[in-house]
Amino acid sequence: MRVILVPVADRPECARALQTAFDLGKRLEASVSGCHIRPHRSSEVSLSSAFSEAAWRRKSTKKAPQAARALYEQIAEQNGYKVVKRASANANAIWAEKVGSPEKLMNIIGPVSDLVIVSRPAKTGGVADVFMMSALIESARPVLVLPQSGRRKIGTKIVIAWNQSREAARAVSAALPLLQRANEVTIVSSGTEDRLGPKSSHLTSYLAHWGIKAERIATRGRDVESELIGAYRDAGGDLLIGGAYSRSRWREKVFGGTTKFLLRKAKVPVLLLHS
């Protein structure tokens, strides 16, 4: 991972996301790209009327870009990062401002990043929710979703939610730089591993090729979400990795599912990949 992207606004949850990004950046020798996205006055140009209307209702909209940049530069300096205008092989801080909608812009800036960091929204349907879902669905990159509050340092004890799916396998592959630097890695499978796909034992062997030693935990599979979080707590986890939408998004929306639970209800840092 060489480029970590963080959408930035002058908000406490963005400050925590930036602190986490720069901490990971130092460990991965990665640049941290901060981007303030503001809507066009026309919702048709911004695409998302919810994003446009909510953002323009804020009295501080005109000052929002300057405040976001000031926050970004302050945290970059605190972490020993130099703000530069052009990308290079060195780990630096790079600032950008974009006009448009998160849905549109995440298609452009997301794929040329290695990791996107956002905060879990306090409510569904607001501006923060638009950013989270746009990052997950449009960027085609792993997205680290952080709780509204919590620890700054993550990734020392990583738990993998394994369900034999391609989505989970791709998430693990994308997170290899983090897994290689973790002190402990735990693989949690739920119920009988009878799907068509690699079992947790196969994943353990795969990770061993990368020099990663992983422990395995199998839960009963009666209550997948609560058992997963229970195993995460028992392992002392500080980051949960999983694939997003192994079932269709429509089925998740109607019937619920693990992805929805991790996005909406789990109060832990989760790294998800939807591709």
Image (spheres, helix red, strand yellow):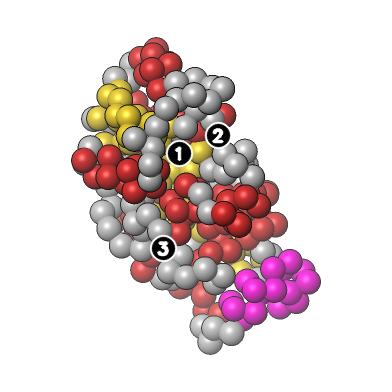
Dot 3: element: helix
Q: Is residue 266 visible?
A: yes
**Does residue 223 belong to the magenta stretch?**
no
Of labels 2 and 3, the one closer to you: 2
Q: Is 81 left or right of 275, judged from the image as shown? A: left
Marks 1 and 2: CB-CB under 8 Å? yes
Category of crowding for the residue at label 3, using alpha-carbon neighbours closer than 10 angstroms: few (below 14), some (14–19), many (at least 20): many
Category of crowding for the residue at label 1, using alpha-carbon neighbours closer than 10 angstroms: few (below 14), some (14–19), many (at least 20): many
Q: Marks 2 and 3, Cα distance to the nearest angstrom?
A: 27 Å
Q: Amino acid at mark 1?
A: Gly
Residue 214: mark: none
Q: Marks 1 and 2, Cα distance to the nearest angstrom?
A: 8 Å
Q: Amino acid at mark 3?
A: Cys
Which residue is identified by label 3?
A: 14
x and y, in percent, of residue 162 in the image: 43, 32
> Which residue ends up furthest to the front in the rendered image?
222
Which residue is identified by label 1?
A: 242
Q: Nearer the viewer, residue 254 or 109?
A: 254
Magenta-drawn segment: 41-56
